[in-house]
Every structure is written in structure tokens, then in C-alpha cells.
């Protein structure tokens, strides 16, 4: 029984539920905007299977990341690998990633073989991102190119599940690439100590934590401004403005880290803040979208 519980616990930790849901939200946003564009939301088989495929895709990427950097992560006490994966080990992560790889391929083949090709290419790219033999994570630009490809595609996939992809969908999708890039840069700042210790020369290690932190803030602040300007002619004003109120809060919270002695802990604290801010604003936008769809249906 204890062995079974350990494996179940390890499986849950392997797919990183919070990070998984954080990125699945981009596909949910795509479905919402697609429904808003069509004026109706129908939860059909394709949408249900599509969300399962996205969960499997992200679970593969995250668990393979655990597998590829397992030894390094074991040295980072803050990640708690020794507690999370007690009695399972590194090979368990690979098996989990393989199962979710196969699930992703199987479901996307049912939806569209073209989507399968894209999913496989993305999964391979993210595998090369963390695998020690290649470690694209060390690149100056490759990690963020992957962000700008993957996150907009998650949004566009959701939009695709409700119908055909439009020009407006392409415009909005870039917003998700921007916020992911900002978050990824901040994450590299948080991991910079262990990355330096294990010889992984990320941009935060190469150029300094504070500089990279400032760039991450630039992305996190300009992303809402981009969303507003890009959607002003697409959405009602109240919806286009929804991410703007969080900007002053992010700036206020970031100033102590910028003016004072910079630390990993301050970057981690800001991550908690911007996640909460974006989640609240996204939920408000989702409510506006659902109310708008309900109003259109009522007419």
C-alpha cells in the first residue's frame, strides 16, 4: 500500500498540476475567444479530447524535464525532489513522460494528423531543451523562441477546436507568448544559483540575475499593454482593459527588488504576485466572455 501511495504521489508531482493548469489556461482562453467569435459555446467531443491532449502534452514536457534534470534538481533543496519522488527515482519520470507522449499522439491523431505533427515537433523541441546532451536551455534566444511558438499555439489550438483560426486569434495569441517569456525569464532568475552550480549557463547566469529580472518585468508589463492595443478594435473596451489594472501592482512589488539588494527570494515572491494577478484578471475576462455569449444567445 505504501509503495502504491508513493507512486501516486510521484505521478501527481511529475505532471506539476499547478504549472500544467497554468498553461492549459491558454487553451481554455483559446476556446473562450473562439466561442466569443462564434457567438456560441458548445462543449463537444473534440473540445473534451483536445483538453485531455493538452494535459497529456504538458505532462509529457514537464515529466521529461524532471527526468532530464533529475540529478541537478536533487541538489536543489527548494524543489524537494527527494521528498516528492521518494521510492520512485529518475526512470519513473521517463516512463511517465513516455505514457503521456503516446496519449498525446493518439488523441491528436483522432482530431487532426496535422496537429499530431506539430505536437510531436514541440515535444521533441522541449525534450532537447532540457536533455543534457543538447541542453537548449543554455541558449540566449532558443528558450524564448520556444515560448513564443508553444504558448500561442496552445491558445490557437483551443480556438481551432471551436472552428477555424482567424487573424484576430493570431494577434491575440502573441500576448500569451509575451507573458510566458516574462515568467520564464523570472523562473531562470530563481533557478540561477543551482544552474550556476551545475554548469547550466542560462541567460540569468550569463548576464546576471538583476538584469534578467528587469527584462522579465519589461515583458510582464508590456504584455497587458499589447493586449489592450491589439484587442481595442476586437473586444469591448472593458474587456480590452482587463489586464491593465495589474500593472501598477507589479511595478510597486518589483521596485524593492530593483532598488535594493536583489535576491532570489524577491524574484520568487514576485512570481507569486504576478501569477495571482493574472489569474484574477483572466477569470474576470472569462466572466465577461461568458456573459457576452449568453447575451448573444438570448437575442
Image (cartoon, helix red, strand yellow):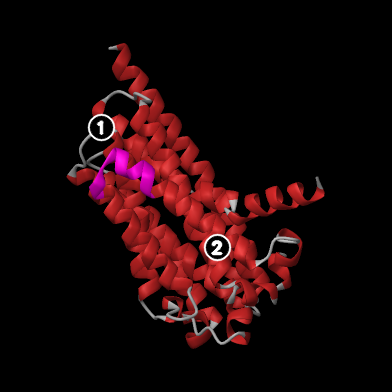
Q: Specify whether residue 241 is in view.
A: no
- Between 46 and 24, the one lying in front of the other is 46
Residue 211 position (above or below residue 178): below
Q: Residue furthest right?
A: 2
Q: Secondary structure at mark 2?
A: helix
**Numbered range of the magenta stretch:** 105-114
Nearer to us of marks 1 and 2 is: 2
State the residue at coordinates (74%, 66%). Answer: 82
Kindly identify which numbered label has been placed on residue 94.
2
State the residue at coordinates (68%, 54%). Answer: 10
Q: Secondary structure at mark 1?
A: helix
Q: Horizontal and vertical percent for residue 287?
A: 45, 30
Q: Residue furthest top?
A: 298
Pointer 1: what residue? 37
State the residue at coordinates (70%, 61%). Answer: 88
Q: Horizontal and vertical percent for residue 161?
A: 30, 36
The answer to whether marks 1 and 2 mark residues whose Cβ atoms lie closer than 8 Å is no
- Between 212 and 14, the one lying in front of the other is 14
Amino acid at each position: 500500500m505504501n509503495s502504491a501511495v508513493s507512486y501516486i504521489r510521484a505521478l501527481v508531482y511529475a505532471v506539476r498540476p499547478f504549472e500544467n493548469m497554468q498553461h492549459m489556461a491558454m487553451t481554455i482562453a483559446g476556446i473562450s475567444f473562439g466561442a466569443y467569435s462564434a457567438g456560441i459555446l458548445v462543449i463537444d467531443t473534440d473540445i473534451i479530447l483536445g483538453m485531455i491532449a493538452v494535459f497529456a502534452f504538458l505532462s509529457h514536457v514537464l515529466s521529461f524535464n524532471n527526468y532530464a534534470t533529475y540529478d541537478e534538481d536533487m541538489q536543489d533543496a527548494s524543489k524537494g525532489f527527494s521528498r516528492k519522488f521518494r521510492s520512485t527515482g529518475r526512470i519513473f519520470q521517463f516512463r511517465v513522460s513516455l505514457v503521456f507522449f503516446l496519449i498525446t499522439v493518439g488523441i491528436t491523431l483522432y482530431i487532426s494528423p496535422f496537429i499530431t505533427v506539430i505536437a510531436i515537433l514541440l515535444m521533441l523541441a522541449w525534450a532537447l531543451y532540457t536533455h543534457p546532451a543538447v541542453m537548449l536551455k543554455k541558449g540566449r534566444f532558443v528558450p524564448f523562441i520556444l515560448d513564443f511558438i508553444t504558448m500561442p499555439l496552445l491558445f490557437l489550438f483551443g480556438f481551432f477546436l471551436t472552428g477555424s483560426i482567424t487573424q484576430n486569434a493570431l494577434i491575440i495569441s502573441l500576448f500569451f507568448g509575451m507573458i510566458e517569456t516574462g515568467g520564464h525569464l523570472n523562473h531562470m532568475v530563481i533557478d540561477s544559483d543551482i544552474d550556476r552550480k551545475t554548469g547550466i549557463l542560462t541567460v540569468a547566469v550569463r548576464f546576471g540575475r538583476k538584469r534578467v529580472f528587469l527584462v522579465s518585468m519589461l515583458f510582464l508589463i508590456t504584455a497587458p499593454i499589447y493586449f489592450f492595443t491589439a484587442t481595442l478594435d476586437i473586444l469591448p473596451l472593458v474587456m480590452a482593459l482587463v489586464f491593465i489594472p495589474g500593472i501598477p501592482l507589479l511595478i510597486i512589488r518589483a521596485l524593492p527588488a530593483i532598488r535594493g539588494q536583489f535576491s532570489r527570494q524577491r524574484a520568487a515572491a514576485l512570481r507569486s504576485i504576478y501569477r495571482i494577478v493574472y489569474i484574477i484578471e483572466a477569470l474576470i475576462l472569462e466572466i465577461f466572455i461568458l456573459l457576452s455569449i449568453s447575451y448573444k444567445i438570448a437575442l
